[in-house]
Image: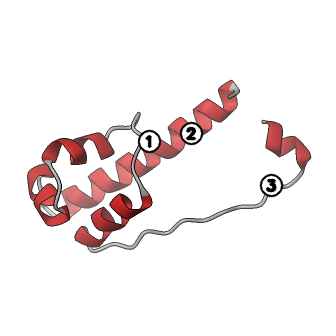
Amino acid sequence: PSLKERLERAGQAWDIAFQISDLRARAGLTQIQLAELVGTKQSNIARIESADYTGYTLKTLEKVTKALKARLQIKIVPLRNKRDAYL
C-alpha cells in the first residue's frame, strides 16, 4: 500500500479508537467495566482503544457500541474518479 493509503487507514483506526475511548469516558466506565458489559477482557478493550489496532470485527464493534448505548454507523463512499482508486 502507498504511504497515503497507510496514513488513511491509520487515521481511521485513530478515529475509531478515540470515539470508543471518549464514549466510555462519558459513560463513566473503566475499561474493566466496559469489558464486563461486552463479555470480553479488559486487554481487548485496551487493544480496541489503541490507535494502531485494526483487527476488530464488525461483531465486536457492534457489541462495544451497544454496551456504550451508541449505534455503529458504517458508510461506503464512492470514489470521485479513477485517480482516487490509486491514491
Badges 1 and 2: C-beta atoms under 8 Å apart?
yes
Nearer-the-camera pick, 36 or 16: 36
Badges 2 and 3: C-beta atoms under 8 Å apart?
no
Relative side of 42 to 71, left or right: left
Disc sitting over residue 79 in the figure: 3
Asked which secondary structure carries label 2, the reply is helix
Please tell me whether residue 61 is drawn above or below residue 41 in the rendered image: below
Label located before the other in sequence (1 or 2): 2
Q: Position of residue 56 (x, y in %)?
A: 39, 49
Disc sitting over residue 9 in the figure: 2
Instruction: Tell me if residue 49 can be seen.
Output: no
Q: Amino acid at mark 3?
A: Leu
Asked which secondary structure carries label 3, the reply is loop
**Hey, which quadrant is residue 39 in on the image?**
bottom left
Q: Position of residue 83 (x, y in %)?
A: 88, 41
Asked which secondary structure carries label 1, the reply is loop
Measure the alpha-carbon separation of dots 1 and 3.
22 Å
Q: Position of residue 77 (x, y in %)?
A: 71, 61
Q: Nearer the viewer, mark 1 or mark 3?
A: 1
Q: Amino acid at mark 2?
A: Arg
Label located before the other in sequence (2 or 3): 2
Relative side of 85 to 75, left or right: right
For the point 52% across and 45% down, the residue is 12
Instruction: Tell me if residue 77 can be seen.
Output: yes
**Hey, which quadrant is residue 74 in on the image?**
bottom right
